[in-house]
Amino acid sequence: MAEENWHFRAEIPGDTVDAATVRRILRSAFDTPHEAELVDALRGGPAWLPGLSMLAETPEGEPVAYVLLSRCHIASAEALALAPCATVPERQGGGVGTALIRAALDAARTEGEGTVVVLGHPTYYPRFGFRPCADFGVTPPPGHDWPTEAFLALALDDRPVPAGAVRYPEPFGL
């Protein structure tokens, strides 16, 4: 299925059906409930940005992928954390996850956000423009030593990426 056939939308705030759908997608894509529990813990908290919790649906309306951008900080500057993102197993490798991440990054740009960080696969995220955080002087949270090639940042506009340690929302446990 071509990317242009996917429908992207924000999770509806307070909608229990959407929340259950997000949990279903995350539970199907990951071996543990950790990611679903993380999203549940973030939902409604100060790091939650409703328009940046996004679902991808087939043209028939079947939800098949999910991505969350939540508020984090780099030193004292606001930024976004990309985590989690997931595609149901039967749709993995078909481009929907990539298309959904692009849609979420576009939504973040529209909202005036400037920087996104991700701890992820070093050969996947560069396709979106992510570069090693070390290139920007961004470091992991204190006490964490993450692989340089997997801890990545993206400038969404012309503003410089702030330097300093990333502070994730409390539910991340970092």
Image (cartoon, grey):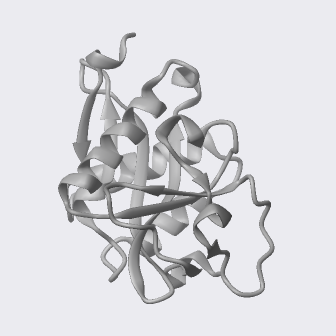
Q: Give the residue drawn at x 57%, y 47%.
A: 27
Q: How many marks?
A: 0
| 123 sits left or right of 89 in the view | right
Q: Position of residue 132 (x, y in %)?
A: 65, 56
Q: Toward the viewer: 87 or 40?
A: 87
Q: In the rendered image, which quarter is residue 99 located in?
A: top left
Q: Give the residue drawn at x 71%, y 87%.
A: 142
| 112 sits left or right of 52 in the view | left
Q: Toward the viewer: 119 or 88?
A: 119
Q: Give the residue drawn at x 24%, y 49%.
A: 107
Task: Indicate whether 145 appears above or below 89.
Answer: below
Q: Toward the viewer: 53 or 119?
A: 119
Q: Position of residue 76 (x, y in %)?
A: 43, 89
Q: Position of residue 34 (x, y in %)?
A: 63, 63
The answer to whether any part of residue 88 appears in the image is yes
Q: In the rendered image, which quarter is residue 48 located in?
A: bottom left
- Which image quarter is the N terminus in? top left
- Which image quarter is the C terminus in? bottom right
Task: Indicate whether 171 appears above or below 25.
Answer: below
Task: Give the residue furthest to the top.
Answer: 1
Q: Give the residue drawn at x 76%, y 60%.
A: 148
| 60 sits left or right of 3 in the view | left
